[in-house]
Amino acid sequence: MRFERQNLKKITILILLGSLFLGCSGMHAGKDFAFIKVNRADLISKATRAYQAGDYAQAAENFKKVLMHNQDDATTAYNLACCYALQGDAQNTVIFIDHAYANGFRNMELLATDTDLNPVREDPEFAALMHKLEQNFKSLGLLDYVAAPSLFPYRIRFPKGYDASKSYPLLIGMHGAGGSAEGFITHYDKLDNPQVIYVTPEGQYPFTMDMGPQGHNRSWSLTNVGRTAWKMADKMVSEYILNTIKQVSSEYKISDVYLVGFSQGGVYAYTIGLKNPDKINGVIVFGGYLMDVDGEDSVLHKEDLEKGKKLRIYIAHGVDDASIGIKVARDLKTMFEMQGYDVTYTEFEGQHGVNAAVFNDVLKWMQL
């Protein structure tokens, strides 16, 4: 199970589901107007399923509905263009790739290699667009990164009746790609009298480095920058989380420390927990998977799995998860058990998200 980073398009659906699973619906009236707020997570899930089933026309219809309610969403525009390309519709492919670029899409390598676009590559209008974009990319120059110190945020919630003289478990929440500390901290409101200190750090990067301004949508992963930068960035995520634990523990009385991660956040929660079983008691992952072990782009190694066995693991996964299939979770359960880990496994009815009832069960599990 590889933590794929080079094919942006194939992880885009995961990114969007990770950030939008709390979508809502209904009509809201203002003083002078009324507007409809759609359930974008549901639309994206439908688009995902249709795309995976090869029904590109239906996938396009759902992506169009998402784009209608967020017209500067470059990722959805690109996915929509791919759906049109797979139907041989070069005109609409050009329209929506151009729209994606206008709203910040910046992955020329993907444009040049994505097989979804192959049906229209010989079309003159598409070829002209590619030539124009190639010239635009050249004018932007090269993109590179340098390591530098910075301050990163976290949000913190306390139990009702918090007593500063008592020790509490610390639960570090890691949002999915496209999420934020602000969004993930609100899960605390779904818990029944949580007697834990809940802290949510925030991904250090925009949710994809292939776009311009994206609002407050964050990612733990730095993509499309080369292996050296990937590994450096992944180590920095670990340092960020461990420093957060250290700071909170210095200011408040902390007993055990747990990480809970959703989707991409779960990938990093596994990695950080397995590499630091002396600092972290357990890891809870909703809708996640394990980073490639001993891969050339990975910071996780077989010796980490050998040394991390005192780490408690709780795996929770939606049976209808269209982004990361349930088989991934089942295989992980088997793998960890064969390695000798203490594993608790739960499947819940639902899709790619954090189930409130299961989250409440997690708190009971932490107290065992």
Image (cartoon, helix red, strand yellow):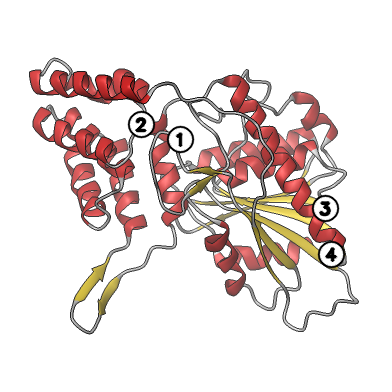
Which badge, 4 or 3, is on the more N-terminal residue?
3
Q: Please state if 126 lies on the left or on the right of 226 as rendered.
A: left
Which residue is located at x 58 percent, y 58 percent? 181
Q: How far is mark 1 from mark 3, CA to CA?
A: 29 Å
Which badge, 2 or 1, is on the more N-terminal residue?
2
Outermost residue toward the right? 165
**Residue 334 x/y as whole percent:** 67, 37
Which badge, 4 or 2, is on the more N-terminal residue?
2
Do labels 1 and 3 touch, CB within 8 Å?
Answer: no
Which badge, 1 or 4, is on the more N-terminal residue?
1
Q: Which residue is mark 1?
A: 209
Q: Which residue is mark 3?
A: 246
Q: How far is mark 4 from mark 2, CA to CA?
A: 42 Å
Q: How far is mark 2 from mark 1, CA to CA?
A: 8 Å
**Residue 31 x/y as whole percent:** 22, 84
Which badge, 2 or 3, is on the more N-terminal residue?
2
Q: 10 Å neighbourhood of mark 1: few (<14), some, or many (≥20)?
A: many
Q: Circle 2 — which element? A: loop
Q: Which residue is mark 2?
A: 106
In the rendered view, would you say 197 is above or below 3?
Answer: below
Q: Which residue is mark 4?
A: 251
Q: 10 Å neighbourhood of mark 4: few (<14), some, or many (≥20)?
A: few
Quarter of the image that includes the N terminus: top right
Please, what is the three-letter code of the amino acid marked with disc 2?
Answer: Arg
Q: Is residue 320 visible?
A: no
Please, what is the three-letter code of the amino acid marked with disc 3?
Answer: Lys
**Residue 347 x/y as whole percent:** 56, 54
Quarter of the image that includes the C terminus: bottom right
Do labels 2 and 1 touch, CB within 8 Å?
Answer: yes
Which residue is located at x 47 percent, y 43 percent? 207
**Residue 74 x/y as whole percent:** 30, 42
